[in-house]
Image (cartoon, rainbow, N blue to C red):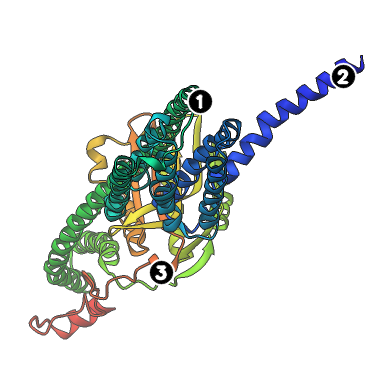
Amino acid sequence: MFMLVSFRGTRRNLIFLKLVIIPKTFKYFFNLGITKQLNQTLIKQVKLTNQITVFMFISALPYSLIFYKFNLHMAAKMVLATLFLYMIIFSLNALSKYESASFLVIATQALIILPFFSIYLGYQSGAHLMYIPLSILPLILYPSELKKGMRKLGYSVIVLSIISVTLINFLVPKLTTLIPSNSLKFIYMFAFFTTFGLILPQVNAFNRSEQEAAKKLERSNKKLSSALTQLRESKESERQLRQYADYARLVQRIAHEFKNPLQMLQGSAELGMHNKSNHKKLFKVVLESVDRLNHLIQPMLNYLSSKQNYKFIAFNISEIVNDILLLSKANCKARQIKMNVINQLKNPVVHGDPNAIGQVIINLVSNAIDAINHNDGSVLIKLENDQFIHEGNMIDGIKINITDNGCGIKQDSLKKIFVPYETSKADKNNVGLGLSIVSKIIEDHSGLIKINSVEKKYTTVSIWLSSSIANVSKPKEEPVFELDFDFFETDNSLQLTDKVTSSSLT
């Protein structure tokens, strides 16, 4: 019974040693000297240096016993010196002397260890076979073209060592010790297997490192592809905004052309209303038409004006959304619409004008509610931290998605949805300025807006806002169009009677 318990305890210890102690020991030596401050190329070099040194250290240990067994005491002592040299390599990496450690792996083998064993034991011992794994080291440790000089230096040292050993063995054969043939055969076979034992781990370590580099490159390519896609979309949005600016300039000129005729019509109609006339009903219709035209033009003029009194501050976007949710509850309840908010923000801070951003969200939520024309309606607001591209720069920001399962938008309409006066709503009083104003506010906040919609299924409006004030650019000083105080007043070039002028100003 005691022997059974002892056997089980020994087995558990062996399993613990195999699964915990040995892997942790290897991991410690493999990562010796690696810090977070190192770049990926240097981390790869340090790890490979440590791995190769560990493999050579383990391979050298049995030779000490073999040489003592065959009474080759000088060779056995050289093995101990070799192990000491390997410990120096580990120490150099631990002291952040990475280049010295990597080169010492090659130099100690080429200038000290292999020349000694190749000369002392002779060619029949197979010691020269160790030059095969040594010749791979410069390529493994210095694969980059940036380390081309070190790679050439490593190969130069190896070639010099091979030439020197060959000449010494040929010119001074007496330096080789006499070893019995049976012992030589055993040493040769052990050297043969050790050579391949060193090559395979080196190639495997190099292969694993290359695979990791390939995976990192693939991940980087995916991120780059995503960034390029966002950049293309951003450029397309910029192109559309330029088109809108051209459209705005056209409206500016049209508005100026409307100014004088409208003024003359208004003045004449008001004069006719004050006079005793049988056409008061007609003048009333004219005044109502002029008033309606003024009502249509004025929002456009406000939209075109770039002088906005924004007050940029840092504020919590979650609070704005919660307030709007409370305001919209009654409307949603009356129309049996479910409204939900998913808040995944770790950093809820937005830099901008909270009133303007509130106006944007209210507009979008109202549009989402109005788009639902069935009983099973729902509006989902989702907030998350996300990056976006603005003017070629990647910006940390907040993404707000507002999704409804309403009527959706036709694909043809999506292309011109931000154009002023373009609207899909049937209400005749709606002038179609909601989304154009929303787009302008987002643009003034250096943000981004996108709309994804499938007709009769859903619509998702996504807006991105910056989390940093440094990324919020000021609106341009030069306005596209600015409404003057005397816009509807009489020009100097147009002289009406005093009565008409005074009546038009009242």
What residue type is disc 1 on? Answer: Ser
Indicate which disc, 3 or 2, sits on the residue closer to the N terminus. 2
Q: Label 3 is placed on what type of residue?
A: Ala
The residue closer to the viewer here, 469 or 38, is: 38
Q: CA distance from mark 3 to mark 1?
A: 76 Å
> Where residue 348 is drawn, which disc sits there?
none
| Closer-to-camera residue (506/127) | 127
Q: Residue furthest left?
A: 493
Relative image position of residue 175 (x, y in whole percent): 41, 43
Nearer mark to the viewer, of 3 and 1: 1
Residue highlighted by disc 1: 183
Relative to 400, 344 lies left or right: right
Asked if the residue under mark 1 is in contact with the one under mark 3, i.e. CB atoms within 8 Å, the reply is no
Q: Quadrant of residue 415?
A: top left
Mark 2 lies on residue: 5
Q: CA distance from mark 3 to mark 2?
A: 70 Å
Q: Is the Cβ of the residue at disc 2 closer than 8 Å to that at disc 1?
A: no
- The image position of residue 193, as x and y in percent, is 45, 25
Q: Quadrant of residue 264?
A: bottom left
Could you say where residue 33 lies in the image, as x and y percent from the top left?
Answer: 53, 54
501 relative to 158, above or below: below
**Residue, x 66% and y 30% (percent of image)?**
19
Where disc 3 sits, the SS reads helix
Does the rendering let one see residue 363? Answer: no
Task: Using the image, determine if residue 209 lies above or below residue 327.
Answer: above
Report the side of 249 relative to 138 (left or right). left
Q: Disc 2 to disc 1, how far (Cα)?
A: 43 Å
Residue named by callout 3: 470
Q: Quadrant of the C terminus?
A: bottom left
Which residue ends up furthest to the right in the rendered image? Answer: 1
